[in-house]
Each structure stands twice: as structure tokens, then as C-alpha cells.
């Protein structure tokens, strides 16, 4: 089964780029571009991994992450900055999804 990844990124074009990259790596990925959208997606779906931009206008990465861990205590949360995503996310998601094997 594919890992379910939610990306929270206010810059939609960047989020879509991240989404495309992770889909190519074999993940099932969705994108939220605002805090209300992220909360809604977290409320109604069980995600394996949350990838969230640390700095977003009119949003709190800490509040979103806190809600995600409340809804699913087993979720892996990866906090990134726009420039660090491609350097870290592939490795971290791979590690998180294969650590139990």
C-alpha cells in the first residue's frame, strides 16, 4: 500500500511541484494551500506523513502539526523550508515509511 502524504504549502505552484515529485516516487499525495484546507484534510483522512512548510502567511505550522498528531498519533511530520524540501523530504519519507520493516 502506498504511503499517504499530505503537503501543506501556501505557494500552490511550489506545492504542486513537490506533489508531482513525490507521486513520481510512488507516494499517494494531496496538497493543502491554507490552514483551513489542511485542517479539513487532516480531519477527514488518515495520513501517514505530513510535510509542512515552516513559514506560511496567515497559518501556523505548529497548530497544523499539533492537530495532525492529535488526529493520528502515528503520523510522521516533516517540517521544511521551501529550499530544503528536495534535499530532505525524499530521504525522510523513505526512512519513515520503511523503518518498521
Image (cartoon, grey):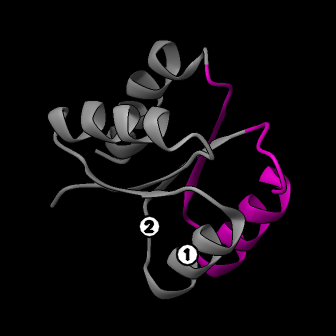
Q: Is residue 37 above or below residue 97?
A: below
Query: Label 2: how many residues lie within 10 Å, few (<14), some (14-19) or many (20+)?
Result: many
Query: Label 1: how many residues lie within 10 Å, few (<14), some (14-19) or many (20+)?
Result: many
Residue 36 part of the magenta-drawn span: no
Residue 17: % across, % down: 36, 32
Could you tell me if residue 73 is visible in this image? no
Nearest the eye: 12 or 53: 12
Q: Is residue 42 above or below residue 99?
A: below
Residue that appears at 51% across and 19% down: 88
Q: Give SS at disc 1.
A: helix
Q: Which residue is mark 1?
A: 42
- Identify the mark at residue 47; answer none if there is no mark: 2
The magenta region covers 54-82
Residue that appears at 57% across and 56% down: 33
Q: Which image quarter holds the N terminus?
A: bottom left
Q: Is residue 27 above or below residue 88?
A: below
In primary-sequence order, the first of circles 2 and 1 is 1
Q: Is residue 83 above or below residue 94?
A: above
The residue lying furthest to the bottom in this view is 44
Q: Are marks 2 and 1 in contact (CB under 8 Å)?
A: yes
Amino acid at each position: 500500500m502506498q504511503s499517504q502524504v499530505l503537503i501543506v504549502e501556501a505557494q500552490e505552484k511550489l506545492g504542486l511541484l513537490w506533489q508531482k515529485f513525490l507521486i513520481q516516487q510512488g507516494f499517494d499525495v494531496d496538497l493543502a494551500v491554507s490552514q483551513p484546507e489542511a485542517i479539513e484534510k487532516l480531519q477527514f483522512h488518515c495520513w501517514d506523513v505530513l510535510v509542512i512548510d515552516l513559514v506560511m502567511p496567515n497559518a501556523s505550522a505548529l497548530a497544523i502539526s499539533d492537530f495532525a498528531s492529535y488526529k493520528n498519533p502515528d503520523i510522521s511530520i516533516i517540517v521544511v523550508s521551501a529550499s530544503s524540501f528536495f534535499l530532505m523530504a525524499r530521504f525522510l519519507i523513505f526512512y519513515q515509511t520503511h523503518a518498521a520493516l
